[in-house]
Image (cartoon, helix red, strand yellow):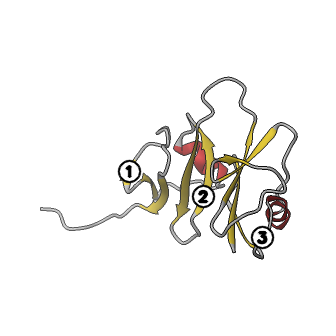
Amino acid sequence: MLIKVAKLGTAVKEVCLDESATVEDALEAADVRVGSSETMKVDGEPAENDTVLEDGDVITIVPAIKGGSGVRKMVKVAKLGSAVREFFIENGHTVSDVLDMASISPGSGEKVRVNGADVPTSTVVQDGDVVTVVPAIKGGRRC
């Protein structure tokens, strides 16, 4: 079965496990450690190491919330010619923050887009956004 493991601020990892695998098995396979100040959830519900997983489950590891809303978002990031990566982030993160997490630095001949629209890197990302870096297209016929 296929399981996704996401730790806030890192790329989402996918692991293949046998039926009846647990959260602990998935974390070990993904080489993800859970700190003492972090919590685990499976598909948004609190989980423990011995929680049994089902195909398609998503495990999220998040820091304990100290004030604020603690709302998390998943965004996808890609640069033309590279794989799409998923990140869990908290409210207030910008396109620039997400590109830094993905180790992507747009060049002078590239545009940054969110959901297909050109945007400044100061744009705050929303849950489900797709951030892409693409070459700027020059030329074309003008009248």
Could you say which is closer to the camera, residue 89 or residue 38? 38
* Residue occupied by mark 2: 86
Circle on res. 20? 3
Label 3 neighbourhood size at 10 Å, few (<14), some (14-19), many (20+)? few
Name which residue lies at 66% across and 47% down: 45
Please tell me whether mark 3 sits on a helix, a strand or a loop. loop
Name which residue lies at 71% across and 31% down: 65
In this image, 10 relative to 29: left or right?
left
Which quarter of the rendering shows the C terminus?
bottom left
Q: Where on the picture, by quarter, is residue 111?
A: bottom left
- Which amino acid type is shown beneath numbered disc 2? Glu
State which mark lies toward you, 1 or 2. 2
Using the numbered discs, state the Cα–Cα distance from disc 3 to disc 1 in whole angstroms. 45 Å
Please determine whether, in this image, residue 133 is positioned above or below residue 120: below
Q: How many marks?
A: 3
Using the numbered discs, state the Cα–Cα distance from disc 1 to disc 2 in whole angstroms. 20 Å
